[in-house]
Image (cartoon, rainbow, N blue to C red):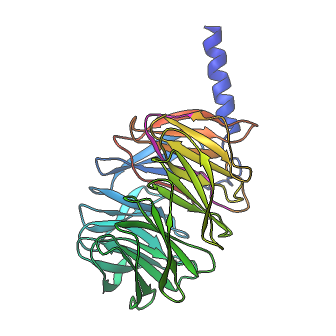
Amino acid sequence: MLTAVLLVGATISLLREQRASFLRPGLHLNAYVSAADGSVAVIDLVRLRTLARVTVGPGVSGMREHPSRPEIWGVSSAGGYAWVLNSASNQVVARIPVGTRPYALDFSADGTRAYVAASGSELLVAIDCQSRTVVGRARTGHEPVLAKVTPDGLMVLVVNRRDATVEIHDAQTLAVRGIVSVVTQPEDVVVIPDNSLAYVLSRSEPRLSVVDLKRRILLANLRLAGTPSEMLLKPDGGELYVISPEAHGLQAINTWTHEVGDYVMLGSAPTHAVLSQDATELFVSDTAAGRVAPVDITNRRVGRPISTGQKPELLRFDTDAADRKPNLLLVVNEGSGDLSVIGLRAGSQSLLTMIPVGTEPKELAVKLF
């Protein structure tokens, strides 16, 4: 009995220690996790408890926190609309028709516009975030799966999966400025901070395309050790890290020379990762092993793995702010249907709790408001 009491007391003390103590009165820090039934679980990251479960629509995808408004946005791939969840009320306040089979969403740099690629309708759609109305449409190639705004906000890159192309659209008019052929079945793109280069990933072949956005040409198709699942760009744009479950590790690519450099072995099936803002530490989920591995990215060393739930997938920190170190690492466990909360302070990295969120969780967003 005494042991149980001491254990509970220690747990409460640890949770308090890991709390987001920087929050001023009236501020909230929540995580949002989607489930297969079309709902989103709202998690209070200060008290580490579920606040609400909100139905947003079938096939939740592309969930993102708005950069300046107290809102979470996403799309319903089955319903053909973008939805807006008010963070204060935990209510869906808008559903905006965009076309059939949308999968992703991105915001302009100032947060005034959202861009959605509707793959079934072959459309790029621009939405005014204040009025929540469609303000522009443009035809795309076949099966556009992603719309990505460049860091300067001047271009929107559309990834056409069936055409194996990247289209370069003007962000204001949506007019096409260029079309570049890339790897087969492309699915993701990142742009370096000076807006000069884009890297295009395919999850069906071990190659990565490098696109010159100024000249609008393909520079190279880089050979990788295995088929990639995700890529992460160092904040200064100097290195790109490519995760591959097939190759059981990570490859670092020099974005100045386009050379594939260091390889780091990570585990059974490394799939997703998150990189700290100071670019010193990377956390990688291993879906087969049920754990997360910390990686000292500067020295290319893998730390002691942290156990999570079954089939860990997406990861996020509790903050992306450049001037604040994160307190928590959040991990979506698709197999066990929960959210692992890992503490990153108090001199250790350890699992604090696991919060049920629903069957087959996929999407994860974090909002301070």
Q: Is residue 129 visible to us here?
A: no
Q: Nearer the viewer, residue 336 or 238?
A: 238
Quarter assignment of residue 341: top right
Q: Residue at x 72, y 59 (%)?
A: 278
Q: Is residue 80 left or right of residue 322?
A: left
Q: Is residue 209 left or right of residue 164?
A: right
In the image, residue 220 sits, relative to residue 70, either above or below, namely below
- Front residue of 236/209: it is 209
Indicate whether residue 311 is drawn in magenta. yes
Residue 187 lies in quadrant: bottom left
At 46% from the left edge and 63% from the top edge, which residue is drawn? 207
Name the spot of residue 140 as percent of width and height, x first.
Answer: 31, 82
Q: Position of residue 254 (x, y in %)?
A: 64, 67
> In front here: 141 or 216?
216
What is the span of residues highlighted in magenta in the rendered image?
A: 307-321
Q: Quadrant of the C terminus?
A: bottom right
Residue lying at 66% horizontally and 55% vertically, measured from the top left: 276
| Residue at point 49%, 77% (across, down) | 149
The answer to whether residue 127 is above or below residue 275 is below
4 lies above or below 352: above
Residue 178: percent from left, percent from top: 42, 88
Q: Nearer the viewer, residue 4 or 305?
A: 305
Q: For residue 78: magenta?
A: no
Quarter occupied by the N terminus: top right
Q: Residue furthest top?
A: 1
**Res 278 visible:** yes
Label tally:
0
Q: Name the side, left or right, on which 307 lies relative to 90.
A: right
Report x, y in % for residue 182: 41, 74
Please indicate whether residue 359 sits to the left or right of residue 1 in the image. Answer: left
